[in-house]
Image (cartoon, rainbow, N blue to C red):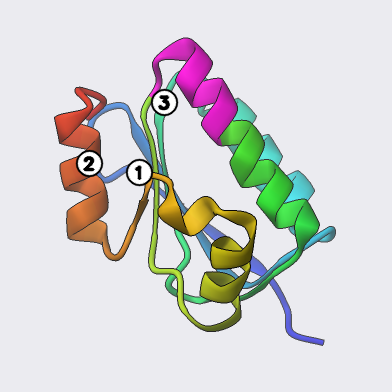
């Protein structure tokens, strides 16, 4: 079983980048949710470049974050999906959502365009 790690950075004013390393699953989800609560009101940037696996729990956290962001006008973007994560995003329809971007540059551009950064 791969281990999970969470790295949190604040690359721009009001932005919280959450990098998920390894697995985004039932074990990692509470830590991600806690981080989101600590940065309530911040623009959220999910860095999935080092995420090797995501399950329904991880998807649920991202979907709930997107719904909350939409309801509150807070920005959200996710980037770096590849391998299994990209397949799951594709199957669930997340890959086609505008907040899912291919890389950090595109994600930050999305946030700027939405007036969130």
Q: Would you name the residue on which mark 2 appears?
A: 110
Tag 1 secondary structure:
loop
Tag 3 secondary structure:
loop
Left or right: where 16 falls relative to 22: left
Mark closest to the chain's N terminus, 2 or 1: 1
Say whether residue 75 is visible. yes
Left or right: where 9 falls relative to 18: left
Separation of residues labelled 3 and 1 (CA atoms): 19 Å
Label 2 crowding class (10 Å Cα cut-off): few <14, some 14-19, many 20+? Answer: many
Q: Which residues are magenta?
A: 66-74
Q: Are marks 3 and 2 in contact (CB under 8 Å)?
A: no
Say whether residue 12 is visible. no
Label 3 crowding class (10 Å Cα cut-off): few <14, some 14-19, many 20+? Answer: many
Mark closest to the chain's N terminus, 3 or 1: 3
Given residues 74 and 95, the one toward you in this image is 95
Q: Position of residue 24 (x, y in %)?
A: 68, 64
Q: Would you name the residue on which mark 3 appears?
A: 42
Given residues 18 and 82, the one toward you in this image is 82
Q: Are marks 2 and 1 in contact (CB under 8 Å)?
A: yes
Q: Quick check: 26 above or below 71?
A: below
């Amino acid at each position: 079983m791969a281990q999970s790690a969470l790295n949190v950075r604040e690359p721009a004013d009001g932005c919280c980048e959450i990098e998920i390393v390894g697995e985004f699953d039932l074990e990692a989800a509470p830590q991600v949710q806690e981080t989101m609560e600590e940065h309530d009101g911040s623009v959220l940037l999910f860095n999935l470049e080092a995420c090797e696996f995501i399950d329904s729990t991880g998807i649920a956290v991202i979907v709930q974050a997107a719904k909350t962001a939409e309801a509150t006008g807070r920005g959200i973007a996710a980037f770096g999906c590849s391998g299994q994560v990209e397949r799951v995003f594709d199957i669930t329809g997340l890959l086609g959502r505008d907040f899912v971007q291919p890389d950090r540059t595109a994600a930050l551009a999305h946030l700027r365009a939405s007036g969130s950064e």
